[in-house]
Image (cartoon, grey):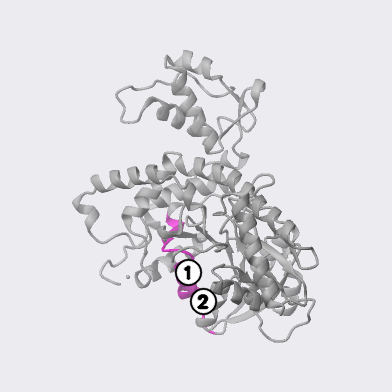
Amino acid sequence: MRGFSLSFQLDPRHKEPLYRQIYQRVKQAIMAGQLKRDSRVPSVRALASELGVARATVENAYGLLMAEGFLQSRGQAGTVVSAPESLSVPAPKPIRKDATRKPINPMLPSVSSLPFQLGLPALDEFPRAIWSRIVSRQIRHTSMNDLGHPPLAGTDGLRSVVARYLQLSRGFTCRPEQIFICGGYAPVLDLIIGSLLQPGDGVWLEDPGYPVTQAFFRAAGAVAMAVNVDDEGMNVPQAVKQFPDARFAVVTPAHQSPTGVTMSLSRRMALLDWAAKQQAWIIEDDYDSEFRYHGQPLPSLKSLDTQGRVIYAGTFSKVMFPALRCGYVVVPESLVDKIEAYCPLRICGTPPLVQSSIAEFIEQGHFYRHLKRMRQLYAQRRGFLEQALTAQFSPDVLRVNQQVGGIQLSASLNKNLDDALIAKNARERGLAVQALSDWQVERTERDDALRPNGLLMGFPNIGTQEQANQLAARLEEVISESQK
């Protein structure tokens, strides 16, 4: 292991257990660039002997590093560094004293699930016992100072943890001060729109696209500009030609919502080029990029941004559970002061207790292990539903669309079927399917070839093939009755 000393000392009296000390030492070496990608690390036996600890101690440390993506086992070839080279860069420069942010006035202003419900992770598989222990520990350690007004932009602990997570998993570096914790995706939009948008500003919206995004921009007086989505994602050349002077673009490049397609690299670069020339803002909604079933998660659009035009939005609701009401937004350096100034009007809606618990959940490696399990589980459960629908319907009635990831499945319908009517009848039968046409930006008459016609279904809570078969049969009854 060139450039990495094995002579570091472990302190048995340290507050952290020995395996955590080994974990932190190896992780720091990777982050600092001492350990390069594909370089081999010592075997468990060799490192345990060198440090004078039990093999199980090193195994625990390596297991945590593997769960977080820093190391990868290659069988007889040994264990190697798998973290991206982008980690081996100098740390962000510390904030200069003359750049210290002005203090914010603290006195200023604060269903039950159904089958096929969208946006709902596998609640039956979340490690509730671990989460309960973490929350209980946070409560026990609550001090008098913790009972006062919470930080407007989020706790320092969670902001720092999110910054490290994004560097590893999404390939870009940011300071904690650029991260603002919000009570979900809607408050993220509210924060961005309230800080930056002026009535009459144009915004590119994917068509079809997430209805909540459309509603927020319309309510703020923005001009919604529908941009078609094809096999390469948002049709950026079309948007540049039709709406060159827009001030915002909202995209879901990892898995387009709702079609699931991935934005091509050429489209991403074209979008970034347009934003730089127009001094426009791109809002990257990276809502479920962690769940990709073929290959590794793709780099974020933010990681390609060299001009500081991308505002990155993420969430914990899709990985953990929606009741957290916790999302976050990463803004360019140039916007930190402006967003901070607006924060007192839209304070963080996630309680500090929840934020601290999330930070500990991530720091202890539970988040990464849960994420790894969910990738495998969702691939299986999507397969259950796809197999059931394929067996239940002929392709000329309903056809499952292929997707590389995400936690919802889209299916195309025969053009003679009315997806809105089917979705309405399905909801009356207790099936939470959604009509693809309801995600249109433009509701005016359109060419039939451009009008989306299909159904959207969540699958993470479909636990068995039998359950999937039963749900497909119920959906078939709804579609049959809707044709009468």
Instruction: Tell me the SS state at disc 1.
Output: helix
Q: Is residue 403 visible?
A: yes
CA separation in Å, label 2 and label 1: 8 Å
Nearer-N-terminus badge (2/1): 1
- Where is the C terminus found, in terms of image quarters? bottom right
Above or below — where is 92 with respect to 423?
A: above
Q: Position of residue 21 (x, y in %)?
A: 41, 28
The circle on residue 186 is 1
How far from the left and from the top, in percent, is residue 393? Answer: 74, 63
Q: Amino acid at mark 2?
A: Phe
Name the secondary structure under disc 2.
helix
Please name the predominant secondary structure of the magenta segment in the image.
helix
> x and y percent of residue 243 in the render?
69, 79
The residue segment tinted magenta is 177-199
Residue under pointer 2: 216
At a point 21% along the width and 53% down the height, the residue shown is: 145
- The quadrant holding residue 77 is top right
